Amino acid sequence: MRMTILFVLWRCCSTAQNDLVYIVDGSWSVGPEDFEIAKQWLVNITSNFDISPQYTQVGVVQYSDTPRLEFSLEKHQGAAELIQAISSIDYMGGNTQTGRAIKFAVDHVFGSSQRGSTVKNRITVVVTDGKSQDDVVDASEAARAQGITVFAVGVGSEITTSELVTIANKPSSTYVLYAQDYTNINRIREAMQQRLCEESVCPTRIPVPSRDEKGFELLLGMNIPVKAKSIPGSLSTEAAYALSADVDITEHTRNIFPEGLPPSYVFVATMRLKSGFKLTFDLWRVLSKNKEVQAAVTLSGQNKTITFTTTSVTDREQRVQFHTGFQVWDLYNSMGGWHQLKIVVRPRQVSAFLDDRLIQEHQLQPVEPIFINGHTQVAKKSRTDVTVSVDLQKLRLYCDPEHSERETACEIYSVCLLSCIHVFCVSSFRAESSLIEPALV
Ligand SMILES: *[C@@H]1O[C@H](CO)[C@@H](O)[C@H](O)[C@H]1NC(C)=O
Ligand SMILES: *[C@@H]1O[C@H](CO)[C@@H](O)[C@H](O)[C@H]1NC(C)=O
């Protein structure tokens, strides 16, 4: 038997497997011109995906008094065909029965997908401009009960925020989007693309008080609690782990990031280095099969720098170095204290924070998707497989770059005390413990 192994280049989103259903308001209040804009917007937010039976399939329901199936999930098997189909949808006109439309989409569009519930992600985006004339609660709950993620996009001044919040998944700050009117809907296109992308690439949830964050809990994913010695953390409530030279933290990248890395993310590590630390090591790195570095956070005790490495469309790799200020010195020189390092990566920009203080911000060249056929490693001496001794309390990759404003270093008592007298910490604790208001974009 011949085995064929495909090494696909995993671009964010494009190769995610989604059943995606757009439920679009075609009531009288929208009007034919704005309906054309809504269709264009749907085309635009779909452009990141690879439309094929293997990856993303898109179905569309238009609704007013009654829902109308424009086309089912399997109908269009390529991007050009799909764009053509969305562009030629005819505007209906009528009243606004959103609940009925959601129920129809769940029962008849998701319900008749051949991939059924075996598909990795089932996502619906409800675009509406007015208050529904029927109840949306039952239909939305039924959708979620079947594992369908619901985004609600409200357009114009007639929408009711509470209704959008009811329709959408929690947290509302992620799943509810709002545009002033249809001419402004283009302004939430990137936000929508980013969130759809996160939804497809970051299905895992990191539990934090009062909400779940999308992202990767690398400490667990990399099996650190199993392999390394448990030690007391920065607070009595925090567990931490001591990595030593005899511990090898290496996993197949396809098990850690099965769909590659998201276009934006926040890398957070809470760690402790030995005082007077002089080595240069990769705190985290993603290697290709040929051991080329595709992503890495490198700490150099000798140079007193932090380096971020990522891919580049024009070069083999790109590296940016963070070195200014006493903060970086602090990381290496303090007498064995805990520090939180945070690298906020966006498509064209990266910034580093140490203990909640910005070190530097750098521009990035466009990056290329990573190969997932190599290994992901933690705490390795640069260019070797030798593990460097370091204590780790947290190692996470959050998918939402806005997360950076919510994640503080308050787990480190002295940092919290210093950096947040008093406003910052108090407000960030509040943000942690209360439901975030829906983001009005
Ligand atoms: C769709 O994308 C095109 C090309 O980027 C842009 O010109 C247009 O304004 C977008 N329209 C909407 C409604 O998003
Ligand atoms: C540290 O500095 C030396 C000399 O400037 C340089 O050659 C080396 O590449 C630096 N290492 C890192 C990890 O930045």
Image (spheres, rainbow, N blue to C red):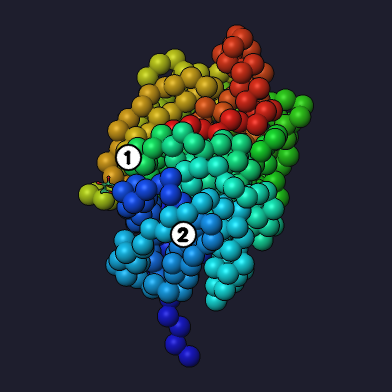
Q: Position of residue 403 (x, y in %)?
A: 53, 33
At horizontal 22% and vertical 49% (from top left) the residue drawn is 314
Residue 381 lies left or right of residue 406; in this view the side is: left
Q: Disc 2 marks which amino acid?
A: Gln
Compared with residue 115, is residue 234 higher up or lower down, i.e. above or below? above
Residue furthest top in the image: 421
Label 1 element class: helix
User: Residue at horizontal 26%, vertical 50%?
Assistant: 313
Give how far across and how far down residue 328 sits, in percent: 45, 22
In front of the other: 32 or 148: 32
Asked whether, in this view, residue 229 is left or right of residue 260, the answer is right
Q: Is residue 346 above or below residue 45?
A: above
Looking at marks 1 and 2 on the same chain, the residue that comes earlier in the sequence is marked by 2
Residue 183's disc number: 1
Q: Position of residue 441 (x, y in %)?
A: 44, 33
**Number of numbered discs overlaid on the protein picture:** 2
Instruction: Residue 107: tell me if it is visible.
Output: yes
- Place of residue 85 in the rendered image (x, y in percent of width and height, measured from the top left): 34, 67
At a point 40% along the width and 16% down the height, the residue shown is 325
Residue 62 is labelled as: 2
In this view, the residue farthest toward the right is 236
In the image, residue 429 sits, relative to residue 294, either above or below, namely above
Where on the picture, by quarter, is residue 105?
Answer: bottom right
Using the image as rendered, state which of residue 148 and residue 100 is in the foreground.
Answer: 100
